[in-house]
Amino acid sequence: MDIKDIEKLAELAKIELLDIEKTKLLQDLSGILAYVKQIETLNVPDLAVEYAERNVWREDESDNPVFSRDLIINQFPDSKGGFLKVKKIL
């Protein structure tokens, strides 16, 4: 990786970098890539991956139906045809 690569990345990211920033970024990216290469050399035995095969979603059910549609409509100051009437916004 060299300065031309950093300039291309900056162009793609639509950012402007000073020369000192390009040099610093080149050093940082070189360190990151060296670390990734070091990780790639690790020998990891095949591990059995365990997945939880269960549904984590729940149905939308209310345990305590305190509010009902009719209760809300009856408590609202103004309603018409089963809808709540509110002040005009625009």
Image (spheres, rainbow, N blue to C red):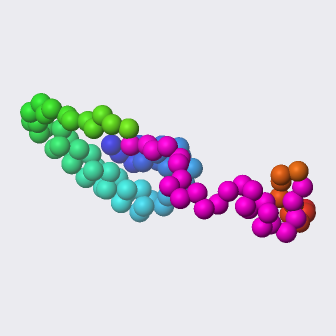
Compared across the picture, whether 52 is left or right of 88 comes to left
**Quarter of the image where the C terminus is located:** bottom right
Q: In which quarter of the image is the N terminus?
A: top left
Q: Can residue 16 be seen in this view?
A: no
Q: Can residue 58 be found in the magenta stretch?
A: yes
Q: Which image quadrant is residue 71 in? A: bottom right
**In the rendered image, the vertical position of residue 2 relative to residue 44, given as above or below:** below
Marks counted in the figure total 0
Residue 29 on image: x %, y %: 32, 51
Residue 62 in picture, x, y percent from top left: 53, 53
Q: Is residue 13 left or right of residue 48?
A: right
- Asked if 84 appears above or below 51 in the picture, the reply is below
Residue 80 in view (yes/no): yes
Left or right of 39 on screen, residue 30: right
Q: Where is residue 79 in the image (x, y as percent from the top left)?
A: 87, 59
Magenta stretch: give its range. Answer: 56-80
Nearer to the camera, 39 or 9: 39
Nearer to us in this view, 75 or 89? 75
Residue 52 lies in what quarter of the image?
top left
> What residue is at 49 percent from the left and 43 percent from the top?
59
Tell me where residue 5 appears, x and y as whole percent.
41, 43
Give above or below for 58 relative to 86: above
Residue sitting at 38 percent across and 43 percent down? 56
Q: Find residue 24 and report its image quarter.
A: bottom left
The answer to which of 18 and 85 lies nearer the viewer is 85
Q: Look at the magenta stretch and give its main secondary structure.
A: loop
What residue lies at 16% left-to-right and 44% top-to-bottom? Answer: 38
51 or 34, nearer to the observer: 51
Q: Does the segment drawn in magenta span residue 59?
A: yes
Q: Residue at x 74, y 62 (%)?
A: 72
For residue 44, side relative to residue 61 (left or right):
left
